[in-house]
Image (tube, rainbow, N blue to C red):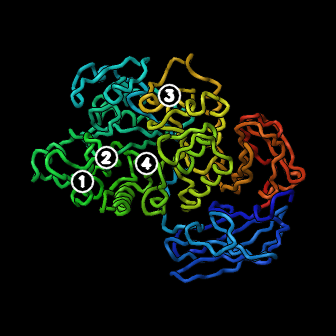
Amino acid sequence: MSTVHWEASIHHDGSPTYLRFSGRPGDTAVFRLRMAADAPVSGVFLRTCPDGEQHFTPLRDLGVRGVCRWWEGELTIRMIRTNYRFLIRADDCSCWYSAGGITRHYPTDANDFVVLANYHAPTWVRDAVFYQIFPDRFADGDPTNNVRDGAYLYHGKPVVARRWDERPNRATGSIEFYGGDLQGIAQRIDYLTDLGVSALYLNPIFRAPSNHKYDVEDYTSIDPHLGGEAGLLLLRKVLDEQAMKLVLDIVPNHCGVTHPWFVAAQANPRAPTAEFFMFRRHPDDYESWLGVKTLPKLNYRSVRLRDVMYAGQDAIMRYWLRPPYRIDGWRIDVANMLGRLGTDNLGHKIGRGIRRAVKAEQPEAYLLGEHFFDGTPHLQGEELDATMNYQGFTFPIWRWLGGFEFNPQRPEADPRPIATETVVAQWTAFRAAIPWQIAGQQFNLLGSHDTPRLRTIVGDDMARVRVAMALLFCYPGVPCIYYGDEIGLTGGGDPDCRRPMPWDEREWDHDLRAFVQRLVRLRRQSPALRWGGFQQLYAQGETIAFQREAPEERLVIVVRRSDDGQRLLPVRHGGLADGVHLRELFSGGETVVHNGMLDIGNLPATGAQIWQTTDKDEVF
């Protein structure tokens, strides 16, 4: 099989081609492993650890089909979480195969494959394409609710009203307002449906004095400058008409200093809400988010706070899931910090409590957490459905395409573009650390309100923007577009990344929007991209290639950041036999696998290809 070692052909993931399981404890799961037909393997065992004791289940050799040999075995799933890996007996050695890859030594359980029983994933999420909106900057639907110049003071400074065509100013970043609101979003639904998105994620809309609303003043009311409750009801109605979902941003880690809870606690250490905060010395020395005094940290040692925020029957996080607003999920701000401070490490306890409450109220709700670091401990089936996948997806792409570091002052920062192999290694590490059921619903993004915009990151190189967009829609997980990225909006760090959406179409990159629109439609129609597996095929030089595989469809995605001379791509180890026909979905070009290779000679120096097999796959 060309020059690729047979071990590269070993493949399994949790997708339907390789794992069939009802999800109910006590039912039998069917596990399949694929490898090259000529792999020198005499036996394969499924290694599990039921009730803590190692157990081996022999797999049956199903024989050769095409260029593949398939192995299969059954196992009754009795535990809520079952770790598993494969022991492969080859002519020259025995090796282990797990989600982290091949090892010749006995591995730890950390990178085992995992199958979860009794885990309910929101069924709509796998089919979704998200669009993130910073509400003050998308569209002004009702000028009568706009903030006026000097209407009030924000920490001693008068607020500023900006014209829609003005750039945000760092000196007045959080106190300048453009007038965007929920009515404006509702009025632009046709734009969103034409783009093809099916779900919205909105930055906070609860009452707060800043434009970003992360300094919450009231979790129980919608900010009147964003349209109030009437605006949310209008948006809900319009979204329902288009069968679109709505996820709101909530800030349970801290609130604003103007919140009545904190005002009362600061005025009286014996106030009922004083236990919601942590005063080192009353009234002005208290714990806050990263030392920002305007954002006092909430104290989850308080059982009453837990009841108010999520656990009680009338809790805040339950209320907005109910009629008439019926939101479809929560994005939890700074989920990595929630319930944690010094000796207090309640993060997982609070995370499990939030999940129980939210899912009891709405089983189909999507529970998403912000996490700029390693969020995988919260993605084991008991807490979050997903995190904003910065480390597992976004940052490696930035560093590969733009040599961009989000925090260049930190010790780990390196402004040099990273090697192609490094990108794939980081993707693999974060994918392997979580169950496949959750990897498939991770929230993938190329930028947000907290980061520079994609186009700025890659230095206005529109070819690299397209490469990144292709990865966004083809990598496992749920894609999210940050408003304006689809038309080539630029912007540096906060607040420049929060420029108003330009509605003068002469300012748009229409070619980019059409490209994104095509990717959105492909993602929403493609079984392989919605629930298919993932196999890394190639990662060398300047080129990355991987396969997405479902029983109904097989795609090979190839991306390149610059010309490395690669004209033929090895694919036999992905199960593609000589003679298999493929069609490239962007250009319509066709080719046939020859000598184990896919001809990618028409791939631009910087660009992407998506190849779809046109032959029916020979899968058992």
| Residue appearing at x 70%, y 80% in the figure | 58
Q: Quadrant of the N terminus?
A: bottom right
**Are the two marked residues, 2 and 3, in contact with CB atoms closer than 8 angstroms?**
no
Q: Earlier in the sequence, mark 3 or mark 1?
A: 1
Quarter of image, res 221 = top left
Q: Earlier in the sequence, mark 2 or mark 4?
A: 2
Disc 1 secondary structure class: helix
> What residue is pinned by disc 4?
370
**Left or right: 590 as drawn, with respect to 34:** right
| Residue appearing at x 72%, y 42% in the figure | 542
> What residue is pinned by disc 3?
491
From the image, state whether disc 1 or disc 2 is nearer to you: 2
From the image, state whether disc 4 or disc 3 is nearer to you: 3
Give the CA distance from mark 3 to mark 1.
Answer: 38 Å
From the image, state whether disc 4 or disc 1 is nearer to you: 4
Give the CA distance from mark 1 to mark 2.
Answer: 20 Å
Q: Earlier in the sequence, mark 2 or mark 3?
A: 2
313 shown above or below 70 = above
**Left or right: 373 as drawn, with respect to 589:** left
